[in-house]
Image (cartoon, rainbow, N blue to C red):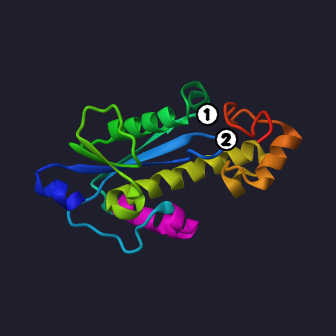
Amino acid sequence: MEKRIWANGRTPAGVDEAGRGPLAGPVVAAAVILPESFTIVGLDDSKKLTHLQRVKILELIITYALDLAVGIVDHEAIDSINILRASLRAMEIAVNNLGRKPDFLLIDGNQRTSLPIPQETVIKGDSRCCSIAAASIVAKVRRDEIMDEYHELYPEYNFRSHKGYPTKEHLEAIRKHGPCPIHRRSFRGVLGPE
């Protein structure tokens, strides 16, 4: 996909997010511009990789990407505007944080951003497009780091283990301790029955 866009004289950025499903913490998006004709062995959807694989590939992305940036939207904004709009806002922040401005966006999923840049949505883009896969890894690793930091503040929820996703352990911790300040109050399972 990137080759087609480069061939038309445009600079593509892949865009993806991490953290739509958790009950706590922010949604994090990333935008990545990879060099033309560039591949990384093992680059794939971040959900298909182990933590160690993601970290190793992230080092290569940081080394070789023409530019990359993240956008973060916190739990309060998620509760205020809903997770879909928060995810799109995080993507827009990530693209706006790039130092090198792309003139075409490849976005994972089926929702376009409101940015005035030509864009194409790609279903399962993190498995089909190198720059989207790179963005998924950048976003996932950054969000995991944030949740590890929150683990230090709220160890009783064990965010380091589940990163805020609705695991049995996490749901039991919410029932036992109630929600903490970073829980998404608008999500089912946080304040009431699942």
Label 2 neighbour load within 10 Å: few <14, some 14-19, many 20+: many
Question: On the image, numbered disc 1 is attached to which residue?
Answer: 75
- The answer to which image quadrant residue 35 occupies is bottom left
Residue 116 shown left or right of residue 135 in the figure = left
Three-letter amino acid code of the residue under disc 1 = His
On the rendered image, what quadrant is the N terminus found in?
Answer: bottom left
Residue 21 locus on image (x, y percent): 60, 46
Looking at the image, residue 48 lies above or below residue 105: below
Element under label 1? Answer: helix
- Among all residues in the image, which is located at the extreme right? 176
Residue at 31% in and 58% down: 65
Residue at 39% in and 41% down: 111
Q: Give the extent of the magenta segment.
A: 47-63
Kindly check if marks 1 and 2 are in contact, taking CB atoms under 8 A apart as contact. yes
| Observer-nearest of 84 and 40 | 84
Residue 47 shown left or right of residue 159 in the figure = left
